[in-house]
Image (cartoon, rainbow, N blue to C red):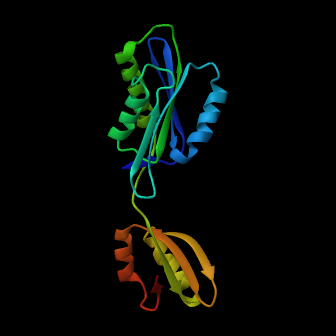
Amino acid sequence: MKFVQKEFSCTFEEKKSKFIAYLMPFDMFDVVMKKVKDEHPKARHYVYAYRYLNEFEQIVENSSDDGEPKGTSGKPSLAVLSGAEIINSAVIIVRYFGGIKLGTGGLVRAYGDSVNEVIKIAEFKEYQKLITKTLVCDYAELSQLEYLLNQENINIKSKEFSTQINLLIELTSEQFEVLKTKLLRNILVL
């Protein structure tokens, strides 16, 4: 499974109808939808589809045809996201009608193709389930520990300084197993 970390857009034309597809992280969906409607006030349709993981690691998905014939735009767009195993992402397709009716099959193909075109230009990051752990160390060990975490590409979410230092880290289970073998004995893992 993969996801995007920023917005991408691409324009696709089919029989004089113009389809502008925007692919973005799911948490940007509402902001981008407002921006798109402001930028394209004369567009006929604002079709969308999205997929994201909820707190139980379940995929939640939804789509809208926004006035196109039922099942001809939102569902095909969602099917493309699903087929490409894209999560935590959303797509909005703006359509300008070109005067030639595409028919239901033509609409399904056009919306699917516009999503495929934006996927081709997008940059993806592989999804990994992350866990958080707290490492407790003395001040003298901090720089060595930070160096190790940097070498292992482990993200430090926060640092708390008191009599000792608590580092909240975010990593995969596999990274944690490797890290445990490299940690100094006196570093406490919570």
User: Can you say whether 120 is above or below 11 in the image?
Assistant: below
Furthest-top residue in view?
99
Asked if residue 76 lies left or right of residue 41, the reply is: left
Q: Position of residue 33 (x, y in %)?
A: 59, 35
Q: Position of residue 115 (x, y in %)?
A: 43, 31
Q: Nearer the viewer, residue 104 or 87?
A: 104
Query: Which residue is at a point 36% across and 40% down the rendered structure image?
Result: 82
Query: Which residue is at a point 43% across and 88% down the rendered structure image?
Result: 184
User: Can you say whether 136 is above or below 40 in the image?
Assistant: below
Q: Position of residue 80 (x, y in %)?
A: 37, 34
Number of numbered discs visible in the structure rendering: 0
The answer to whether residue 154 of the structure is visible from this angle is no
Q: To which quarter of the image does residue 163 belong?
A: bottom right
The answer to whether residue 65 of the structure is visible from this angle is yes
User: Can you say whether 11 is above or below 148 in the image?
Assistant: above
Furthest-front residue in view?
70
Asked if residue 166 lies left or right of residue 120, the reply is: right
Q: Nearer the viewer, residue 72 or 156?
A: 72
Query: Which residue is at a point 42% across and 46% down the rendered structure image?
Result: 60
Asked if residue 123 lies left or right of residue 138, the reply is: left
Q: Position of residue 150 (x, y in %)?
A: 49, 71
Query: Which residue is at a point 38% across and 70% down the rendered structure image?
Result: 175
